[in-house]
């Protein structure tokens, strides 16, 4: 990626391609390679000199824990991009501020002021192997819970929130995740529930009440005075406290009554046809949109697909969304193969082109975020939540719940709820299959 110096609008050329004759360019006095010379050196030699000044210790040697970072940055195919990163990013200041005697760990970076520079530097160090990989969303949630609980003045309230947030919310989330990483929506849901619990406790304290002394009428009075989101999430905390014998308050769960949005099947198929045949749309956007429209996948689930989820042979292409792989029809199968062959993230630093993600993100070694995936789908004219509901409603009408759960990766209770909402009756499914005749 270099500035355009010649060519045409359809075939732009950089300065080197505009003048491909090596004799036109001066040779670098340091490495002897012809090219554009800046301050007496070529761009790569200038970058190497800056990296040595930044990453060396007092003896002039590259610090052992930063050698992999030096090699990754010095060997990049885009030295101008790395030089711009050194000029504009706060990462060099962070590296200079680290004590050479301190081992570079995740905990050391956690102690720095939170922000995008620290997180991007962390992702680079993880991608090149300097730091071990970890669940960043879960680590961020743990730090947030620790700060939030520590900000409470009452020790008894701190203990109560610690039991709820750490021993219940975090524990249940870890058990649900198993070996996978947490998503942004899961972290946001846990944070919202903690905020709702704090909101209820603050209201009780303001009215000289507690979970023990409050009565059902007090809870109803609070529910009528708070916004809907806080009321909904506080129910989880009240039910947990009641189960733990901490209160006599009751907050019954609300049964899901089916989709509240419009189920427009014709619009769904019209959008699917456009993505299947419109070659002006990027392949990655077409695949992501079709996974929502045809297979009822969340943007967060799509963003975390890897190459291991795609299986190909000479006859068919399969994608594993749940326990059982799904055979992809044409032209979606060709689009997936094209995406596997041409996928590329936007990270120019720390990415060796070996990312396992089907949708690489802007940070090396990480997939595209669920938020960004949702934004790209909305740019295509899709509403991910509504489109998924429409697809799941139609699929629940045509397929039994057990098959939906195995193939789409959704929980069996969710599949059963959607089957009931779509009025699907599969009590006679086996009999219907037995009566079918071969075409």
Image: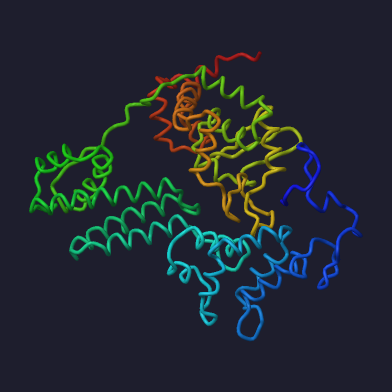
* Foreground residue among 1 and 333: 1
Q: Is 93 placed above or below 233 here?
A: below
Q: Residue extending furthest front?
A: 39
Could you tell me which residue is drawn at 67 percent across and 47 percent down? 344
Residue 403 lies, in percent from the top left, at 51, 31
Image location (x, y in percent) of residue 263: 43, 21
Residue 87 locus on image (x, y percent): 60, 63
* Residue in the picture at 56% in, 62% down: 89
Write down the quadrant of residue 235 in the picture: top left
Identify the residue shown where x is 23% and y is 39%.
227
| Residue at horizontal 52 percent and vertical 47 percent from the top | 369
Q: Residue furthest bottom?
A: 59
Q: Is residue 151 left or right of residue 259?
A: left
Q: Is residue 195 left or right of residue 274?
A: left
User: Does residue 194 appear left or right of residue 302 in this picture?
Assistant: left
In the rendered view of the protein, which quadrant contains the C terminus? top right
Colour scheme: rainbow
Q: Nearer the viewer, residue 244 or 147?
A: 147
In the image, is residue 267 above or below residue 118?
above
Q: Describe residue 363's horizontal placement relative to residue 79 as left or right.
A: left
Q: Position of residue 148 (x, y in %)?
A: 30, 59
**How many marks overall?**
0
Classify 400 as above or below 57.
above
């Amino acid at each position: 990626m270099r500035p355009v110096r010649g060519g045409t609008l359809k075939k732009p050329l950089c300065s080197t391609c505009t003048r491909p004759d090596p004799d036109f360019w001066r040779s670098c006095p340091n490495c002897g390679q012809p090219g554009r010379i800046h301050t007496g050196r070529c761009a790569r030699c200038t970058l190497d000199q800056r990296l040595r000044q930044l990453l060396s210790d007092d003896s002039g040697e590259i610090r052992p824990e930063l050698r992999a970072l030096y090699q990754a940055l010095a060997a990049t195919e885009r030295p101008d991009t790395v030089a711009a990163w050194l000029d504009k990013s706060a990462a060099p200041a962070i590296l200079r501020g680290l004590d050479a005697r301190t081992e570079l760990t995740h905990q050391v970076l956690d102690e720095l002021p939170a922000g995008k520079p620290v997180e991007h530097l962390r992702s680079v160090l993880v991608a090149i192997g300097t730091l071990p990989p970890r669940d960043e969303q879960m680590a961020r949630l743990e730090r947030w819970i620790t700060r939030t609980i520590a900000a409470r003045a009452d020790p008894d309230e701190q203990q109560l929130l610690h039991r709820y947030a750490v021993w219940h919310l975090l524990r249940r989330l870890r058990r649900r995740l198993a070996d996978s990483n947490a998503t942004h929506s899961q972290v946001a849901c846990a944070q919202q529930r903690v905020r709702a619990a704090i909101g209820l406790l603050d209201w009780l304290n303001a009215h000289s009440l507690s979970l023990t002394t409050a009565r059902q009428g007090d809870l109803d009075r609070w529910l009528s005075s708070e916004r809907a989101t806080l009321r909904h999430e506080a129910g989880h905390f009240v039910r947990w406290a009641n189960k733990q014998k901490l209160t006599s308050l009751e907050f019954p769960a609300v049964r899901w009554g089916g989709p509240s949005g419009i189920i427009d099947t014709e619009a769904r198929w019209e959008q699917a046809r456009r993505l299947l045949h419109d070659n002006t749309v990027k392949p990655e956007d077409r695949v992501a949109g079709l996974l929502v429209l045809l297979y009822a996948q969340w943007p967060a689930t799509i963003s975390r697909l890897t190459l291991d989820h795609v299986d190909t042979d000479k006859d068919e292409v399969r994608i594993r969304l749940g326990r059982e792989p799904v055979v992809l029809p044409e032209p979606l199968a060709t689009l997936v193969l094209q995406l596997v062959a041409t996928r590329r993230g936007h990270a120019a630093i720390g990415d060796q082109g070996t990312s396992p993600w089907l949708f690489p993100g802007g940070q090396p070694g990480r997939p595209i975020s669920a938020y960004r995936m949702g934004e790209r789908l909305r740019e295509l004219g899709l509403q991910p939540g509504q489109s998924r509901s429409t697809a799941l409603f139609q699929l629940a009408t045509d397929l039994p719940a057990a098959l939906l759960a195995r193939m789409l990766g959704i929980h069996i209770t969710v599949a059963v709820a959607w089957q009931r909402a779509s009025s699907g009756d599969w009590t006679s499914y086996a009999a219907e299959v037995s009566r079918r005749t071969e075409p």
